[in-house]
Amino acid sequence: MIFIHEFKNGQKLFHIQTLSTSYVFMVYHTGHLIQLHYGKRVEDSEHLTELYQNYATELGSSTLYDAHNKLTLDTAMLEIPTFGKGDYRTPSVELEFNDGSRVSDFTYLDHKKHDTKNHPHSLPHIIESESTLETLEVSLFDKVKNVEVKLYYTPVHSVDVIVRRLELINHSGETVTIHKAHSFNLDLNHSRFELMTLDGLWIRERQINKGPLRPGIISIDSKKGVSGANHNPFIGLLGQGTNEKSGECYGFSLIYSGNFSGNVEVSPYGMTRLQLGISDFDFRWKLESGTSFDTPEVAMTYSKDGINRMSQNFHSLINKHLIGAKWQNTPRPVLINNWEATYFDFNMAKLVKLAKVAKDVGVELFVLDDGWFKGRNDDKSSLGDWTYDTKKLPGGLKALSDRLKGLGLEFGIWVEPEMVSINSDLYRAHPEWAIQLRDRSPSLGRNQLILDLTNPEVVNYLYESLVSVFESAAITYVKWDMNRNFSDLYSNYLDVDRQSEISHRYVLGLYGLLERLTKTFPDILFESCSSGGNRFDMGMLYYMPQTWTSDNTDAVERYEIQYGTSIVYPPSTMGAHVSGRPSHQVLRSTPIETRFNVSAFGVLGYELDLTRLSRFDLKVIKKQIEFYKLHRMLFQFGTFHRHESPFEGNSMSWSVVSEDKDKFIAGYYQKLQKPNPPLETLELEGLHPDEIYSVQSRIQYQNVRDYGELINPYIPVKIKDGGIMQSVIGNRYLYKLEVQRATLPGDVLMNIGLRMYSQFSGTGIDEKTRNMGDFGSRLYLGVISKQKNQC
């Protein structure tokens, strides 16, 4: 809800409420917007103006904005700070005018309350779902330079999120240059916080980093042209002692896919300033008179109940108010991707052979990855030439999709439309369409250049080419890749004085292309990819409801990658595949059950050569897929809880709970086996405290080969390590691991936990011994006991 109070002295008070939070600010006597409170929900009252706090006397070595009120902006909690009037902290908006001056001063002009949400132009945004979203619009004006700023606030009540952005409008009659326009600013009156960011690099994305704030500025950014794997466009502030289950925390996520920056600044007075938006590095935007500039939206949330609740707020926002209605709560298919099975070396016969085995084990969707278009036998050629390779695919994509349809499989395809190979017909015809400097040799990434999406002719070419591809066969899924970062920035389309607009205009061109394609093909499920998780952000999720989480499919590395990703993004958005052994990224061999147990908490796929697996592996995979399909909606759309962090110890646990709290699945994972390990307990969250749950571990299997001759006391025949009998049995026999059952009330599972069977301690195995081993794992399914437990 939005409350507005207007007073006789000209002051105005704005109070934005969500289910559990309040955001309060006011118009001060000088016309500046002053932030009063963001945090726990309070009842609305006109007396909230009494929360205003600043120094009553002039501070030494300060600059007074208003001598009468002794106001210094350097200690004010401002909604839109600018440079040049006494606030020496980082401004959120920086403008340059034709006379060379760079001082701005925005004061209150008017406000409006809209019954529906106001969206930014040509940018992804939060959408209205079952009910409308009211929006507060507050206009500020620089009376000297005739520039207007509109601030937008949209509360998404049920998920405790407030969406913010700003719009700059030039009324001056002259061109104004924007040097910086962050989407929002938040000032807080203390700095007793821990900063949390999601950092990393290729095949090690979104690693959780925490550290105390200190005087000065801490920044994250991307200069790569994409949001990037180095720093996700997210910032968290954690109160002292905050953990997953308790304590105060704030979260801020930018709905944008290009260069960004985020700053957290602690002032000399111990106040905290936080900003997030389009990067101001190498950015200058010419704002002509009579035109406007929209910033991307930022979603911000507050939780008094720990980091899990903050994440759940973001998850609900994404699932209900960001992803398009078509894909909200829509189960995602189990897929097989041929990439790690074949790489570029395939033909029709090899693909059909793989597809037949995939169908036999329960796969629903076959995805043809890179290498299907003409001349594409390695990564050195052919990007941009989107016509099928007649040698690999006689009869084309339609012939393959027809074969797959005959098997009962849907068909998906990989594309990388934003790129062009120098060795391609497209580049030979239009070298000017590539982003590159005229007087320098280009620096390549993966042997390719980036197409200039600031150029409408390029965007139209891509649209028409992709329409032709997508209409050529029964395609129901598209994996949209983007495998390099920007360099040699120059557009042959843009004027010389607009070259510093290229990064943002590229993103706008991409969004425009995606808008057209997703409207033309509303039934195609698009998955975003950028060398794995190099562009995992809310901006891409607006157009594509899932993202390839990482090129690293090693299960143990995925502990941290998926755990960190879940800070902002729900399992329904995470592409997660069971791959072969050893891992192609770290050469580690992990149990096939653990590979599934990790991937199940996401959009499940398989990316390995099924035709070369043992009968044991194929039988196990079939049972895995049966279990996943049975609980697919819970895995993909259940309320996600993190319990034990892989960043802090040898074990990790997480769970998903159904919306009605009648069912849960918990995953427990370890890294290395410890000798004579301690007894362990798995604590859960989010259950009915008064209901009784029937809990059972998922039935899992192990290959007897893993035990050598130590298995002999536990099976009816004797085998020799390395012998023929071991090979025969190992390929066919499913050695069933322990199955644990328990009946416990919800409050016991949450406050005490599930006391798991003891691990192998070096002396023997029985039906109550968990033989986890290195990289072992277990899943536990719980249902309210009146229901049947389906493990």
Image (cartoon, grey):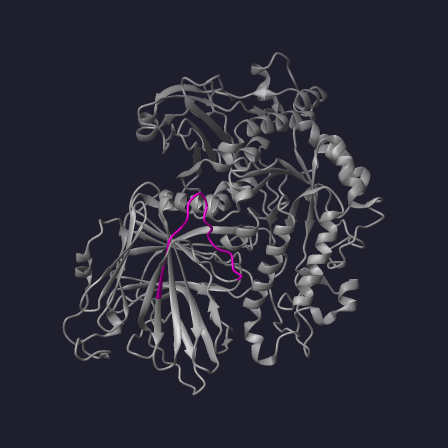
Q: Is residue 636 above or below residue 126?
A: above
Q: What residue is drawn where x is 32% and y is 68%? A: 110
Residue 159, percent across and down? 38, 45
Q: Viewed as shown, does residue 523 lie left or right of 181? A: right
- Camera-side residue of 640 and 675: 640
- Camera-side residue of 707 and 453: 453
Residue 769, percent across and down? 46, 21
Q: What residue is drawn where x is 44% and y is 19%? A: 787
Q: Is residue 236 visible?
A: yes
Q: Is residue 671 visible?
A: no
Q: What span is in magenta?
A: 122-138
Q: Viewed as shown, does residue 381 lie left or right of 303? A: right
Q: Main secondary structure of the magenta part?
A: loop
Residue 79 in the magenta stretch? The answer is: no
Residue 128 in the magenta stretch? The answer is: yes
Q: Point out the residue furthest to the top here.
A: 716
Among the 4 quarters of the image, the one containing residue 654: top left
